[in-house]
Image (cartoon, helix red, strand yellow):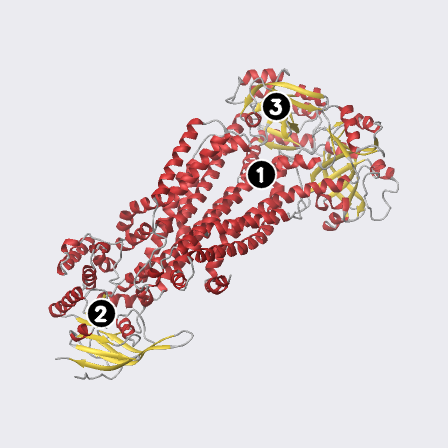
């Protein structure tokens, strides 16, 4: 501890900027880790809070998934002796249309009974003293005081909303005090009469769920068992909190992606710390030599540097935690937006959920990473020869040296990886192969850097005989010094390439899928986006659409989330035979395309998406079992298709089957094919004119739908931009560090160069060329490892994340872009070290050691 | 014999003209390494600078060589005042007019003999072919024609110093500055290197300034300047 105060602290203070750079890697890693996980947890936390606040004293909820259920179910539940009170609920997020307000959660209830479960805490008693007054006016809305204040609304203010019966103006007839129920959904909550909501959302005579409380003397479990027996497997009966677990499994796919990004950032941070500590050891050789001469043991020196690593880890982690919380604030809005668009589950997460356990875990990871990264430099420091360190004219280049054992170990691991690829099959074998190839590449990097530097020397020398040769020689002389940065660059680029490769491959597959199946001329939807499913069309709209001039075929599609083997997947019901007839270049993963649609169309089977088949090990003939309000639907799998509708999987059934089991003839989207002579623009106008003021309806052109899907994919892969930014940051930090060590190691060499006539520009050139050479080597190795990494990442996505199968395609364009980006980053990184080299004292350099 | 001292500031025909030069190093405590030193070195002279450690001899050599700048006073090299020169102009002056020979040779370990000698030529932008010819010629002159492709690590101390001398001569610089050229060599090799330096003085007419602790080396020079406590305390010329 005394050495830390006497030796380390003055050094850190003297090199403040570098000390900050050293911890930057850990700050970045911890910040991303905390930011991404906190954002996900905040969205999940906000969802649970909303569920909790809306639940009031609800003990159990009855639902039948997204489809809802008939009104008569309510009477059956209310009649159950274990139930004290049961009230119907419709709950749906809608766009407010108010700038910056996003969605408003409509909680539609039956006011006559609902107050027995929920405390509305109204301001004044003027509204609900007589619930019948509220009910008698179907345009009534009660909003939270918070929402009203934000939007300048008062009692009797009008609020326009687009309903299934066209645009309607609602009147604010009540305000809820801030807090409790009113603060659900970030305060963006409105209460509506449930029978009015059925009209507004096109729910027919259906409710979304029933909230209930059990009778005194009856346990919740007893009541639950009785209701499950009464309603059958198509209904879910559970406490309000269980809704969170479904939401959690939807968020999970996104969480995995976030976890990978933050782990990657931390991993890169490890190399940055390693490099920075290598600098410290190089610069402080003399100091170490003196300490050793004065009696400090090797162990003491090693512990001193490990303690410095721990200190850097502690400061870096603390800063990372703070930065992570800030990142989480921005990111949680993005995550909630993404979840609304992709999964149609919305949540406003204005407040973030800080989990002390997560913070403690992130802190521990940050410190451990830092200590681990300082281990090798600490060992080098312990090995400093005091005689050489103190001897004038002797230079002990600590970062020099190569290890044959490492190379052999790398070769062995490559052999293991090849064996794993040959054996294939099981998950452990696959991951052993992946792990082996990554570790092998890490072990090989010093040798590969060395060989590449040697190969580059003639080219660099040809460009600039002295500056080029010295730049290459600097890399050749100290492969370990270079290899830390090259490794960091290689790893980050390998991740960037893998992510970009995933994106490119996904885009290609998605475009192919869109071209094949999304070929109707127009799509008529209840929302501007495909994901939102708050509103439903009555079936009659289909007939009305068919009657419009220019329309040849109309196909109604109903999509809803159902639980399959504990996972919320997408169920799509449509006229499958009709869809098959219009599919361009039909291709099936398993089964005959036409035949599977014929069988499914006759209600003799279900078609499943390839990712569902992958994740749940389904094949032709496997039985899928889905609980519905009309009983358990069991169908054999008659075909498997490549489909990207949902990351958790999709099952396609015929409309007739859906109608039978769900007793629901509503439609989410109409696929409209036009007559050959008809113009899409003109027909779109006709549809809008036909339903103007009468129906909530959006007509989207084929290109708009495709653009929407591509935009969603863009959002999903927005993380690749973060990865690229991290890679650039790594390049800059790593190269600045490497060059600083290099200049330290080559102080005398640079001094000699200047003494014998090198102009300042020529000295700068040698530093710049070294930086560019490091970046070039990192680029080449990063692309090679990226190509391998992409192969494994595609397999990981397929095996363990979404089951989506996408073809391998190396991202050539992204890789080409990386070349100028990384070289420019290297050049930027070399500017400051270049100046440092030029401005250093020539006399001191020549007398160095 | 005492040498005449010129008045500071006068333009002279002396190759090295130092007038009232002081050098202070700033730190927690200011250290004066040279205190108002004035001296002139004629073209073709061979001067040794002697004095105890810390007397300022290396500082004086660094200032003459343009490796450092004085805190006050004026230095002229071949009539050109170096104070007003930019970094790059000073480098050009150093490259064209001054050759350095260091105690620790200061060869670049990654470059072979011919590349080390070629270094200043490349830096000046000579054509590659001409560079190689000139470097080879110089290596042959210092009797290392058979070692052109060897790395410094593969050479003896004396051979390394020969390479360093060859490098110092690439531009036929009129001034050769040597900082303890024999300090890192055994006595036989030291004598050999000293002999080579004398040959260069004789045959090329170079002006040579040697900083040394070695009394034999100092005695072998025509003129010896002694420094003590940052001042010139004696300046003797042997006939």
Query: From the viewer's perspective, is the residue at label 2 or at label 3 nearer?
Result: 2
The chain letter under disc 1 is A
Where is residue A286 shown, x and y percent of the image?
A: 38, 62
Image quadrant where one finds the C terminus of chain A: bottom left
Residue at mark 3: chain: A
Residue indicated by mark 2 = B177
Say what secondary structure mark 1 lies in: helix
Q: Cα distance, mark 2 to mark 1?
A: 69 Å
Residue farthest toward the right in the current orientation of the protein: A130
Are there few (<14), some (14-19), or many (20+) residues within 10 Å of tag 2? many
Q: Secondary structure at mark 3?
A: strand
The answer to whether one can see residue A780 in this image is: no
Q: Which residue, given by chain and number where applicable, does mark 3 sit on?
A: A652
- Tell me what residue is drawn at x 62 percent, y 47 percent: A357
Which percent across, then down, holds residue A41? 63, 43
Q: Chain of mark 2?
A: B
Tell how many labels.
Answer: 3
On screen, residue A105 versus residue A375, left or right, reads right
Image coordinates of residue A424 in percent, x first then y, are 45, 27
Residue with the most extreme left position: B203
Question: Which secondary structure, mark 2?
Answer: strand
Which of the numbered marks, if any, corresponds to residue A254? 1
For residue A383, which quarter of the picture? bottom left
Do callouts 2 and 1 mark residues in contact (Cβ within 8 Å)? Answer: no
Q: Nearer the viewer, mark 2 or mark 1?
A: 2
For label 1, the crowd category at 10 Å Cα-Cα, with few meaning under 14, some 14 to 19 and many 20 or more, is some
Q: Image check: A746 left or right of A531?
A: left
Distance between mark 2 and mark 3 Cα atoms: 89 Å
Q: Which residue is at a point 33% across and 67% down the rendered structure image?
A: A844
Q: Are callouts 3 and 1 both on one chain?
A: yes
């Amino acid at each position: 501890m005394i050495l830390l105060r006497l030796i380390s602290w003055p050094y850190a203070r003297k090199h403040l900027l570098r000390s900050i750079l050293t911890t930057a890697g850990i700050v970045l890693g911890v910040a991303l880790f905390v930011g991404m996980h906190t954002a996900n947890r905040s969205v999940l936390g906000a969802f649970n809070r909303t569920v909790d606040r809306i639940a009031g004293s609800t003990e159990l909820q009855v639902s039948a998934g997204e489809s809802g259920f008939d009104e008569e179910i309510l009477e059956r539940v209310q009649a159950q002796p274990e139930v004290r009170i049961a009230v119907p609920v419709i709950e749906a997020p809608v766009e407010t249309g108010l700038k910056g307000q996003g969605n408003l959660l409509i909680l539609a209830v039956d006011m006559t009974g609902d107050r027995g479960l929920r405390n509305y805490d109204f301001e004044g008693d003027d509204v609900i003293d007589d619930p019948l007054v509220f009910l008698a006016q179907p345009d009534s809305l009660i909003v939270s005081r918070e929402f009203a204040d934000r939007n300048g609304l008062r009692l009797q203010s009008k609020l326009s909303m687009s309903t299934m019966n066209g645009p309607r103006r609602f009147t604010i007839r009540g305000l809820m005090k801030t807090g409790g129920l009113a603060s659900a959904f970030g305060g963006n909550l409105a209460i509506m009469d449930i029978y009015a909501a059925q009209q507004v959302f096109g729910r027919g005579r259906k409710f979304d769920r029933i909230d209930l409380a059990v009778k005194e003397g009856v346990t919740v479990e007893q009541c639950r068992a009785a209701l499950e027996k009464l309603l059958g497997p198509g209904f879910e009966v559970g406490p309000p909190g269980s809704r969170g677990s479904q939401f959690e499994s939807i968020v999970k796919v996104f969480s995995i992606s976030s976890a990978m990004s933050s782990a990657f950032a931390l991993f890169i941070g490890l190399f940055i710390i390693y490099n920075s500590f290598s600098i410290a050891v190089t610069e402080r050789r003399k100091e170490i030599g003196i300490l050793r001469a004065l009696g400090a043991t090797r162990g003491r020196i090693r512990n001193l540097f490990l303690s410095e690593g721990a200190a850097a880890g502690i400061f870096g982690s603390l800063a990372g935690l703070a930065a992570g919380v800030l990142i989480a604030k921005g990111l949680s809005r993005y995550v909630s937006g993404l979840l609304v668009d992709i999964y149609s589950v919305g949540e406003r997460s204005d407040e973030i959920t800080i989990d002390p356990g997560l913070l403690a875990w992130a802190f521990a990871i940050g410190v451990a990473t830092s200590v681990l990264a300082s281990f090798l430099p600490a060992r080098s420091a312990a090995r400093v020869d005091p005689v050489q360190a103190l001897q004038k004219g002797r230079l002990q280049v600590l970062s020099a040296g190569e290890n044959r054992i490492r190379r052999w170990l790398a070769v062995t691991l490559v052999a293991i990886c090849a064996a794993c690829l040959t054996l294939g099959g099981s998950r452990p074998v696959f991951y052993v192969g992946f792990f082996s190839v990554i570790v092998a590449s890490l072990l090989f990097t010093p040798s590969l850097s060395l060989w590449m530097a040697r190969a580059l020397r003639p080219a660099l020398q040809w460009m600039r005989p002295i500056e080029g040769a010295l730049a290459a020689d600097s890399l050749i002389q100290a492969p370990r010094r270079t290899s830390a940065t090259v490794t960091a660059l290689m790893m980050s680029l390998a991740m960037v390439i893998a992510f970009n490769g995933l994106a490119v491959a996904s885009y290609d597959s998605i475009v192919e899928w869109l071209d094949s199946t999304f070929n109707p001329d127009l799509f008529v939807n209840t929302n501007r986006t495909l994901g939102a499913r708050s509103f439903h069309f009555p079936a009659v709209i289909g007939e009305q659409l068919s009657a419009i001039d220019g329309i040849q075929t109309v196909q109604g599609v109903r999509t809803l989330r159902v639980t399959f083997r504990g996972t919320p997947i997408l169920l799509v019901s449509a006229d499958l035979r009709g869809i098959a007839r219009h599919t361009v270049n039909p291709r099936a993963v398993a089964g005959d395309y036409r035949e599977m649609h014929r069988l499914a169309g006759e209600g003799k089977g279900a078609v499943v998406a390839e990712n569902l088949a992958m994740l749940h090990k389904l094949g032709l003939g496997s039985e899928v079992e889905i609980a519905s309000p009309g009983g358990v639907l069991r169908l054999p799998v008659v075909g498997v298709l490549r489909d990207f509708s949902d990351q958790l999987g999709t099952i396609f059934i015929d409309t007739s089957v859906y109608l039978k089991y769900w007793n629901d003839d509503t439609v989410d989207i109409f696929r409209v094919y036009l007559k050959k002579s008809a113009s899409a623009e003109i027909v779109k106008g006709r549809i809008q004119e036909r339903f103007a003021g009468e129906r909530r309806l959006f007509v989207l052109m084929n290109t708009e739908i495709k653009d929407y899907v591509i935009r969603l994919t863009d959002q999903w892969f927005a993380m690749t931009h973060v990865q690229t930014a991290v890679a650039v940051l790594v390049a800059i930090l790593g190269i600045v560090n490497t060059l600083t060590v290099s200049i330290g190691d080559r102080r005398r060499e640079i001094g000699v160069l200047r003494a014998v006539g090198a102009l300042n520009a020529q000295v700068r050139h040698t530093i710049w060329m070294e930086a560019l050479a490091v970046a070039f080597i990192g680029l080449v190795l990063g692309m090679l490892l990226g190509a391998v990494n992409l192969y494994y990442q595609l397999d990981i996505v397929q095996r363990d994340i979404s089951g989506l199968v996408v073809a391998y395609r190396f991202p050539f364009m992204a890789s080409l872009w990386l070349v100028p980006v990384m070289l420019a980053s290297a050049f930027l990184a070399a500017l400051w070290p270049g100046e440092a080299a030029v401005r250093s004292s020539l006399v001191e350099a020549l007398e160095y050691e | 014999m005492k040498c005449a001292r010129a008045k500071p500031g006068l333009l002279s025909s002396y190759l090295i003209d130092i007038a009232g030069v002081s050098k202070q190093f700033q730190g927690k405590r200011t250290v004066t390494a040279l205190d108002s030193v004035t001296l002139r070195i004629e073209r073709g002279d061979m001067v040794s600078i002697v004095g105890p450690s810390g007397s300022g001899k290396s500082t004086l050599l660094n200032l003459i060589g343009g490796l450092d700048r004085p805190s006050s006073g004026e230095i002229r090299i071949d009539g050109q005042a170096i104070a007003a020169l930019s970094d790059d102009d000073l480098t050009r002056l150093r490259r064209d007019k001054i050759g350095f020979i260091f105690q620790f040779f200061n060869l670049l370990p990654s470059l072979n003999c011919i590349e080390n000698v070629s270094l200043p030529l490349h830096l000046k932008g000579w054509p590659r072919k001409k560079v190689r010819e000139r470097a080879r010629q110089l290596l042959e002159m210092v009797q290392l024609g058979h070692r052109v492709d060897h790395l410094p690590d593969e050479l003896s101390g004396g051979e390394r110093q020969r390479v360093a001398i060859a490098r110092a001569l690439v531009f036929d610089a009129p001034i050769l500055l040597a900082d303890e050229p024999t300090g890192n060599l055994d006595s036989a090799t030291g004598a050999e290197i000293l002999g080579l330096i004398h040959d260069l003085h004789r045959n090329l007419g170079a002006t040579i300034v040697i900083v040394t602790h070695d009394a034999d080396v100092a005695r072998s020079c025509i003129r010896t300047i002694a420094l003590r406590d940052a001042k010139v305390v004696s300046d003797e010329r042997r006939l």
